[in-house]
Amino acid sequence: MDTSGADTSTGAPEGWVNPLRDPRDRRLPRIAGPSGLVIFGVTGDLSKKKLIPAIYDLANRGLLPPGFSLIGFGRRRWAHEEFAAFAREQARERCRTPFREDVWEQLAAGLRFVTGTFDDDEGFDRLADQLVALEAERGTAGNYAFYLSIPPDDFPTVCRHLDRTGCTRGPEGSWRRVVIEKPFGHDLASARELNAVVGAVFPEDSVFRIDHYLGKETVQNILALRFANQLFEPVWNANHVDHVQITMAEDIGLGGRAGYYDGIGAARDVIQNHLIQLMALVAMEEPTDFSAAALRAEKTKVLESTSLALPISETAARGQYAGGWQGSEQVVGLKDEEGYDPSSTTETYAAITLEVHNRRWAGVPFYLRTGKRLGRRVTEIAVVFRRAPHLPFDATMTQELGQNALVIRVQPDEGVTLRFGSKVPGTAMEVRDVNMDFAYGEAFTESSPEAYERLILDVLLGEPSLFPVSREVELSWQLLDPVLRDWESEGQPEQYQAGTWGPRGADEILARSGRAWRRP
Ligand code: BG6
């Protein structure tokens, strides 16, 4: 078998190496090498709900090295055992795979806690000593990732201390990486500052920016759907596509999250990162291969060709949920949620329109919307096709025929739906829309890993494909900044009733061109 990667098929220039024929079998999961993970903000919500359970699941799947170490850094005066008891509780309650005592015991042997605050020199000195000690005790080989699950305001202090104590530099041959969580700033200027702060102590290829949507199975399937098939790509352009709708709707409210959410809002929380990344994956050109460099280059390129549709007053909308009924539950409006000021102008719903200025997408609007307390929880990407240029039917026969659409159902009920017209059975001729469905749950027996499992593993493996680079982050802010400035000058957002599909202003964006949002 030829495993050199050299292309021997006809047509390729002599000596051309097909990067897709890397001799490594990519179907096999990779196991992280000797390493440890330090979490700042380890008692926070994200760590409890996502990070610790994901680490347990990775251990349970045999994807962590035997000497793996998890180091929590925080204010509490915890002994290692107390931290282990806390972590066990989180893992047991929320793990995806079955909880097994033997797996836990092995993981727990590598759990450490370092007491300290972010402005406390001694805490970081102790952390540095702990990392060195673990090299000998657990064989981490000096490889560590630092997960900053903390407010961005604390990044400069933590980065400075990591640098001062030498934590950013390991022994010869080892690696040090930093993982940062959104929000990556609150506008372009602050994102640049943040990138500079982190970049001053960690080189760009050691910075892993988490956008957990990129770790979702269905999001990665966008690339497989587009580039592993012949069927879709020929119609994936302005000649055939009328518009694209990207929706991330949630039914939950914001009670208990005031500290993070108030003053941030839906556009910064979700559009700047998750939705613009989804849009980039839908709109980008085919990468030369699936290397991180090639993927990031294509995403960056398409974002560079993207602009906000104008005028903002007609192409963007925001709203704030008022009280109402969600199913059988009566819920309060944002202003009555605990921790929110009754005069809060924070939007809980945001919609924007983007345009991509290239040959493929000229004239095709990309509508992005997200909101809390909407009709139901659903994230989907709908590529809506133009109508057939001519219908050789009597108008009454196609009265109920809509536009063809390809809908990537990101969650829940993960899969893909193709909507097209079909004859209604009977002696008369009538054409109506039908759906052809692919459902992950039916097609595969394997269950999907949680986004955080994949992303944490990728950090430990040093596999950067699923992490946006600083340029992508800055380009996203560049798109959003004018909308945010516009909204700031406008005062109160429009109210919408909980359990509905958002403010009227959002419907008007599409209605202006005779279109309508899907009701998923
Ligand atoms: C986070 C947002 O990034 O994504 C939250 O900050 C949102 O506001 C969450 O609820 C949704 O994630 P998922 O994976 O449940 O769709």
Image (cartoon, rainbow, N blue to C red):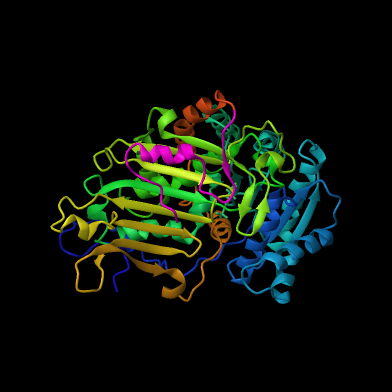
**On-image quarter of the C terminus:** bottom left
Is residue 495 visible in the rendered image? The answer is: yes
Q: Which quadrant holds residue 124?
A: top right
User: Residue 217 appears at what percent x and percent y?
Assistant: 47, 61
User: Residue 48 appears at what percent x and percent y?
Assistant: 71, 56
- Tally the marks: 0
As drawn, the residue found furthest toward the left would be 392
Left or right: residue 479 compared with residue 459: left
Q: Which quadrant holds residue 243?
A: top left
Residue at left offset 51%, top offset 67%? 448
User: Residue 28 appears at what percent x and percent y?
Assistant: 46, 70
Residue at left offset 63%, top offset 48%? 324
Q: Decide which of 319, 363 is in the foreground and name it.
A: 319
Is residue 162 visible in the rendered image? The answer is: no
Residue at left offset 61%, top offset 36%? 264
**On-image quarter of the N terminus:** bottom left
In reply to whether residue 493 is colored magenta, the answer given is yes
Residue at left offset 59%, top offset 26%? 491
Residue 276 to residue 466: above or below: above
Q: Decide which of 225, 253 is in the foreground and name it.
A: 253
Residue 74 to residue 30: above or below: above
The segment highlighted magenta reads: 492-520
